[in-house]
Amino acid sequence: MEKVIKNAKYVAASKKMKNVIPEIDFNKAWIDFFQSKKIPAERFLKKIGTTAKKDLKEIPMDVLLKNELVTVYFSRSNNIDRLLDLLQNVHSFGKQFCGFLTDLCESVLKGDNSISFPARMDPGTFQEFLFSWIGSLGKRKIKIADFKKLLLFLHFGSLKALIDHTTAREAINTVLTKGRKKSGISGEKLSELELMLCCPPQQEFYSCLLAYSESLFFSVEKPRTEIKNTKASNTEMPKDNSLNELVENLQRENKEKTEELVQIKEAYQFQLEELKGKIRGMMHDEIARWLDMAFAASNAEPPRINVVRERLEDTLKLIEKGKPWLQPLG
């Protein structure tokens, strides 16, 4: 009877345990990941993500954990494969682990004594470092270890937004052409179908190739579609009434101002002519008076020649000075 009771308690306890998710030590799980090859990165990220706090969109990197992970990373030479595995799967879980792995990558690269990783981080500096490192490899065919390190650089640059697709493609192409012998035979370029069928017979290769080609297709096709839609909307778009109204208002205002200026000019012209007439009359009177004086002086006994000369000279000076005012009204 006691044996039956014990078995019943054991069964009840085991059933109860199946319904409870065991808590995972977050820091220990990361260290165990780099010390073991058993858990694939995709399964590990999914498992560790379920234990993280639900309200955290991005999981922060603890400084102590980062230092311990860097130490564990350099304790085994093949840990670069584990880190690349994580980086290749990180985008499947949104941005939850992007910042965490970016910090880890940066610490690993700065701790690598075989490279001079830049302290200042901007696109120009990083890309200069990247192609300088590629140039330091020489012209020989690149080793697998160096190619993995290049991928680590590119993953880090992508997460930090230091490189774009064109830069990454140029870097990979530069590395892959190292040590390649030129045959001198210019064969025809392979078609897209031929290139696809040249891949190794593994599903993973084809999955990546199809995803990559689809992404490229949409990146090229989307701008074309947007341009077509823009052209179509421009052709179908009616005339802008507000713009036409603005132009009409400006034209009407310009016409009104022009007419107003003409009226002002005419008014001032009339006043000017009136003033000129008055001045002209005054000058006529003055000239007539001086001529009368000169005539009277010439008829005097004896004639007063000096007075005649003076009055004639004054008359000539006044006429010369007032020529504009003596013009007839017109």
Image (cartoon, helix red, strand yellow):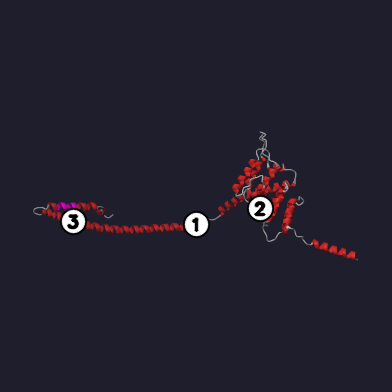
Choose mark 2 or mark 3, whichever is in front. 2
Which badge, 2 or 3, comes first in the chain's sequence? 2
Residue designated by label 3:
288
Residue designated by label 2:
103
Residue situated furthest left in the rendering: 301
Bin the neighbour count of mark 2 within 10 Å (Cα to Cα): few under 14, some 14-19, many 20 and up: some
Residue 15: image location, x then y, percent: 82, 62
Q: Quadrant of the C terminus?
A: bottom left
Left or right for 150, reference 263: right
Residue 82: image location, x then y, percent: 72, 49
Decide if residue 103 is in sight here.
yes
x 58%, y 52%: residue: 230
Bin the neighbour count of mark 3 within 10 Å (Cα to Cα): few under 14, some 14-19, many 20 and up: few
Inspect the magenta stretch and tell me whether residue 197 lies in it: no
> Of 181 and 249, which appears nearest the observer?
181
Above or below, 218 relative to 187: below
Inspect the magenta stretch and tell me whether residue 308 lies in it: yes
Task: Calculate the distance from the C-alpha at mark 1 to the C-alpha at mark 3.
Answer: 67 Å
Q: Which residues are magenta?
A: 307-313
Residue designated by label 1:
243
Which SS class for mark 2? helix
